[in-house]
Amino acid sequence: SQGAVSSVNKEIPVLQCHGDCDPLVPLMFGSLTVEKLKSMINPANVTFRTYSGMMHSSCIEEMMDVKQFIDKHLPPVD
C-alpha cells in the first residue's frame, strides 16, 4: 500500500511525456498513470504530453517540452 502524499508535495509540478506508438508501455498505461497522479496531487499541476509516432524513446519536441518545463519551474543556475 502507499502512504498519503504529504501536503508539501500536493503542489509539485509534474510533466509526464509519452509516445503514442510505444510498444513497451502502451499509451493507455500513461493515461491511467496521469489520472492516478491527478487524484493524488493538484490536477492543475499535472501536464501530460503525447508525441505522435514516438516509440519507447524520445524526440526533439519532447526534449524541448522538458527544457521549457525545467526553465519554468526551477530557478536559473548561476
Image (cartoon, rainbow, N blue to C red):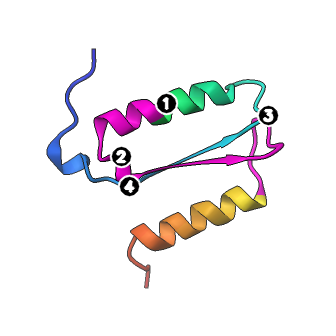
Q: CA distance from mark 1 to mark 3?
A: 17 Å
The amino acid beneath tag 1 is Thr
Q: Is 14 rendered above or below residue 57?
A: below
The amino acid beneath tag 2 is Pro
**Residue 39 located left or right of residue 51:** left
- Labels 3, 2: front one: 2
Q: What residue is shown at x 49% (from left), y 73% (from top)?
A: 71
Q: Residues within 10 Å of mark 2 (few under 14, many from 20)?
A: some
The amino acid beneath tag 3 is Cys
Q: Which residue is disc 1 drawn over?
A: 33
Q: Residues within 10 Å of mark 4 (few under 14, many from 20)?
A: some
Q: CA distance from mark 1 to mark 2?
A: 12 Å
The picture quadrant where one finds residue 66 is: bottom right
Proximity of marks 3 and 2: CB atoms separated by less than 8 Å: no
Percent position of residue 53, x then y: 83, 43
The picture quadrant where one finds residue 16 is: top right
Percent position of residue 73, x then y: 40, 68
Q: Secondary structure at mark 4?
A: loop
